[in-house]
Image (tube, rainbow, N blue to C red):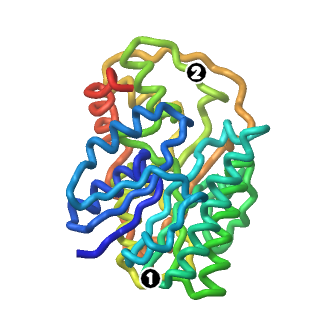
Amino acid sequence: MDTVIVTGSAGFIGSHLVERLLKEKYKVIGIDCLTDYYPIEIKKYNLEELKNENFTFFEQDITEMDLIPIFNKSKFLIHVAAQPGVRASWGNQFEIYVKDNILATQKILESAKESKSFKKIVMASSSSIYGEQEGIMIEDITVPKPNSPYGATKLASENLGLIYSSNYDLPITSLRYFTVYGPRQRPDMAFFRFIKANLLGEEMTIFGDGNQIRDFTFISDIVDANLNCMKSKIHGNVLNIGGGKTYSVIDVLNKIEIITGKKNKLIFAEKQKGDVRRTEACIDKAIEVISYSPKISLDEGLEKQISWIKDNLGNK
């Protein structure tokens, strides 16, 4: 039974990864420092759902850990720990983003270099590294130009992976996630806010005119991409992981109304600094090298997330 290390294992994406790995009969070592960017109780709730004899959890800060003894126990690492949020990354908060997104990644890569135990390291990157672009985003063609401090730290983290891969032959691939949604989504994220407000009959704030375009990716497709990448022999790559189709925010709001049967109460506010007008992933490379194939449509994914929020609204 192989062991997989998952950083950020108590969060939205990390907890889904741990859940799938346990189902596939891996042992999992989780690391998460349970930051207070959103309520810690939510992360503890996620961890309760993951209790399993094959899951070992460390509540520690990566930058303060001796990682090598843990790394020596595993052949695989999936690094999704990060300080999230485009809008919160300005000003004094930037120090947190540097520590949790850049310094923590560098600590992981240095420890992996010393350990020499990994057959594959999969790192989470973000569509935020692209910034404001025209048209579809292609890994080897579209020049990254982040539009937020958060995006800048994710690009720095991704570049560190490429540097360690080329200089020390570490088997690293970074996956650029495009707007992930689904059950257990963070409460500050748009879909959660929209659905909660709709169900409770509350007003919801839309930043911008609602015509901004996004490539939305359901959480199980993100998990599939990570596991396909972990099991592959490729490394030294960056891959876009998107949903395969784009929609406007207005499209999403209309779909929520149809599924719940309730009208939205919309308030439009000024576009926020760091937000971009459009994201659209070219996923041809991921299809070719890790057999990625998004399976969940936006309609199906929204139904799943709405159902989950209805069942868990009292816990959030």
Residue situated furthest right in the rendering: 91
Of 32 and 163, the residue lying toward us:
32
The residue identified by callout 2 is: 205
Mark 1 secondary-structure assignment: loop
In the rendered structure, the answer to whether residue 156 lies left or right of residue 249 reads right
In the rendered structure, the answer to whether residue 78 lies left or right of residue 100 reads left
Where on the picture, by quarter, is residue 309? Answer: top left
Alpha-carbon span between mark 1 and mark 2: 48 Å
Disc 2 marks a residue whose amino acid type is Thr
Residue 161 spot, x, y in % from top left = 61, 73
Residue 204 spot, x, y in % from top left = 53, 19
Q: Residue at x 52, y 55 (%)?
A: 81
In the rendered structure, the answer to whether residue 262 lies left or right of residue 107 reads left
**Nearer-N-terminus badge (1/2):** 1
Where on the picture, by quarter, is residue 153? Answer: bottom right
Q: Residue at x 67, y 37 (%)?
A: 87
Disc 1 marks a residue whose amino acid type is Ser
Compared to 12, does 154 lie above or below?
Answer: below
Compared to 166, does 313 lie above or below?
Answer: above
Mark 2 secondary-structure assignment: strand
Q: Quadrant of the N terminus?
A: bottom left
Residue 235 spot, x, y in % from top left = 51, 81
Of 203 and 16, the residue lying toward us:
16
Q: Residue at x 61, y 67 (%)?
A: 107
Q: Residue at x 35, y 69 (%)?
A: 4
Residue 143 spot, x, y in % from top left = 73, 66
Which mark is drawn over residue 117?
1
Of 55 and 139, the residue lying toward us:
55
Q: Residues within 10 Å of mark 1 (few under 14, many from 20)?
A: some
Where on the picture, by quarter, is residue 52? Answer: bottom left
Which mark is drawn over residue 222?
none
